[in-house]
Image (cartoon, rainbow, N blue to C red):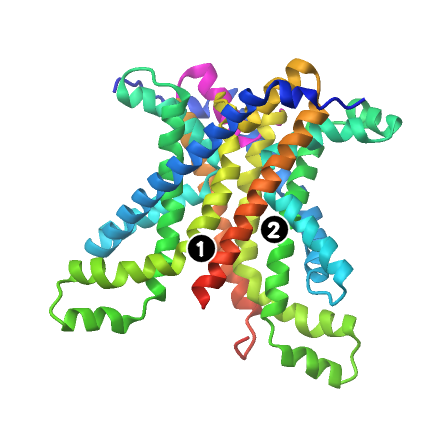
């Protein structure tokens, strides 16, 4: 293997700047997508535990659509197809006046895809809380919403905290797919540096290091959260 | 007006794309299982250092996006071999090594699910450690995680669409090509959604059925 190493390259402009803005976009995509996906996924997840057959069927269909179609295809649909199907004026606004359309489309795709996965997670978490808890809440005179809010959900959240963290890691990784519709996030920037300089090891190495760093930080945050939130009695 | 005739006109092109997606999935599952098993064996038979190396391998591959892995190997495989190779070869290497990390984690969970008494009993009956693993522990561990293996294979099938970035003609790329050529994005992508949806739904239903059969 004949290769000229040049790690100093990464510290030079414009490459250092590219990597950092790429990291910025990756973080922005992940957080924006997460902020939409979390409430959406929670709602659908609660609907998945409903006793109404209609609600159950509809939420089940929602989950199956977003989980059984590859994210890349979903991203293309949001970018190329959805603006065409919208009412003419809205579609035009989407394509022409919306600042940074690639970014917001990618956020939507990531958010809906992730919401389907989160819904399943919340359903599993809610069902993992022993049934007696709900009955006891019922017996103390709480209505169903109160029981969910004060008794069941706090316990379910503690149960699903570890997989919830890996879902956030997944959205960070999945945000790389935004490069296919033109968002210059971290993976795209490292690819661009490789194209410009032929120094793939350094470019991809830097991106890998950033992703690993994000994963390490997230693991740390999760462990701290778990300690803070742990109940005196095991749930 | 929607015009779905382009699907029929390009049926064989699309079918070849689907075939490539399925082949890549199959290769990824077999290669991933092989690498995953190898990593698990390293964990079983080497000391602390071997374990740490495997841990690091798994952690890094699980921390970075598959797209980045595909780019890595698209760039690195020709460099290491010293001659240009096609996107197909580098994609296979990327998927095998990437899936290997996930499969080794699944296998680890499977091994944990086998009770400790099984190993002790095997050792007490005069088997060597290797024999105990080969004849007693591994068969049980594999059986326990077969549904998870298959679920991972469905995820992999969806992930094969990422070879779009290295211009391999998988199903999604084939759809994109005809969509752009004929200017029929809505029809082409609607059809692709339907195909992926039905395949994954059927596969998931199959896995669920298998799970119930196993549980019995």
Q: Residue furthest left?
A: B126
Residue under pointer 1? B147
The location of residue A227, given as percent across then percent down, is 52, 67
The location of residue A163, given as percent across then percent down, is 53, 57
Q: Residue at x 64, y 40 (%)?
A: A110
Nearest the viewer among A97 and B66 is: B66
Q: Is residue B212 above or below residue B125?
A: above
The location of residue A199, given as percent across then percent down, is 39, 20
Instruction: Classify 10 Å Cα crowding around label 1: few (below 14), some (14-19), many (20 and above).
Output: many
Q: Residue furthest bottom?
A: A139
Q: Residue at x 29, y 15 (%)?
A: B83
Left or right of residue A217: residue B60: left
Instruction: Classify 10 Å Cα crowding around label 2: few (below 14), some (14-19), many (20 and above).
Output: some
Whether the magenta-drawn stretch holds residue A100 is answered as no
- The disc at residue A203 is none
Tag 1 secondary structure: helix
The location of residue B48, given as percent across then percent down, is 23, 55
Left or right of residue A45: residue B115: left
Q: Is residue A201 visible?
A: no
Tag 2 secondary structure: helix
Dominant SS type (magenta): helix
Magenta-highlighted residues:
A182-199
Residue under pointer 2? A117
Nearest the viewer among A220 and A112 is: A112
The subunit carrying tag 2 is A
**Image-quadrant location for residue B110:** bottom left
Q: Residue at x 44, y 30 (%)?
A: B70
Nearest the viewer among A208 and B83 is: B83
Q: Residue at x 49, y 28 (%)?
A: B163
**Looking at the figure, which quarter contains the C terminus of chain A?**
bottom right
Q: Is residue A129 above or below residue A139?
A: above
Discs 1/2, front: 1
């Amino acid at each position: 293997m004949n290769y000229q190493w040049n790690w100093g390259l990464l510290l030079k402009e414009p490459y250092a700047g590219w990597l950092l803005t790429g990291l910025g976009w990756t973080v922005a995509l992940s957080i924006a997508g997460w902020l939409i996906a979390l409430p959406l996924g929670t709602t659908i997840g609660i609907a998945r535990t409903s006793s109404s057959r209609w609600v159950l069927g509809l939420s089940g269909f929602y989950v199956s659509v977003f989980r059984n179609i590859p994210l890349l295809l979903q991203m293309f649909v949001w970018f190329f197809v959805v603006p065409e199907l919208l009412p003419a004026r809205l579609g035009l606004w989407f394509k022409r006046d919306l600042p940074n359309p690639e970014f917001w489309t990618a956020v939507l795709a990531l958010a809906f895809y992730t919401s389907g996965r989160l819904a399943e997670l919340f359903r599993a978490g809610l069902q993992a809380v022993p049934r007696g808890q709900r009955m006891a809440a019922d017996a103390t005179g709480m209505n169903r919403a109160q029981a969910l809010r004060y008794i069941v959900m706090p316990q379910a959240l503690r149960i699903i905290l570890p997989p919830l963290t890996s879902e956030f890691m997944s959205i960070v990784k999945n945000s790389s797919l935004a490069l296919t519709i033109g968002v210059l996030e971290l993976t795209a920037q490292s690819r661009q540096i490789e194209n410009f300089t032929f120094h793939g090891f350094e470019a991809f190495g830097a991106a890998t290091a950033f992703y690993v760093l994000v994963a390490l930080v997230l693991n740390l945050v999760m462990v701290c959260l778990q300690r803070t939130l742990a109940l005196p009695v095991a749930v | 007006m929607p015009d779905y005739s382009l699907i029929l006109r390009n049926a064989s092109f699309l079918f070849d794309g689907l075939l490539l997606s399925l082949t890549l999935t199959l290769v990824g599952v077999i290669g991933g299982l092989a690498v995953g098993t190898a990593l698990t064996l390293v964990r079983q038979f080497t000391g602390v250092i071997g374990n740490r190396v495997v841990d690091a391998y798994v952690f890094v591959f699980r921390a970075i996006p598959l797209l980045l892995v595909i780019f890595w190997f698209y760039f690195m495989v020709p460099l290491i071999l010293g001659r240009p190779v096609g996107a197909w070869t580098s994609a296979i290497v990327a998927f095998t090594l990437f899936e290997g990390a996930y499969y080794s984690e699944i296998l680890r969970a499977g091994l944990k699910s086998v009770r400790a008494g099984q190993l002790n009993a095997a050792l007490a009956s005069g088997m060597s450690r290797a024999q105990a693993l080969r004849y007693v522990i591994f068969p049980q561990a594999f059986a326990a995680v077969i549904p998870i293996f298959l679920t991972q294979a469905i995820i992999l099938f969806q992930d094969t669409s990422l070879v779009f970035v290295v211009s391999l003609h998988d199903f999604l790329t084939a759809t994109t090509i005809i969509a752009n050529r004929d200017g029929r994005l809505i029809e082409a992508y609607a059809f692709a959604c339907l195909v992926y949806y039905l395949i994954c739904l059927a596969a998931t239903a199959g896995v669920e059925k298998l799970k119930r059969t196993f549980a019995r």
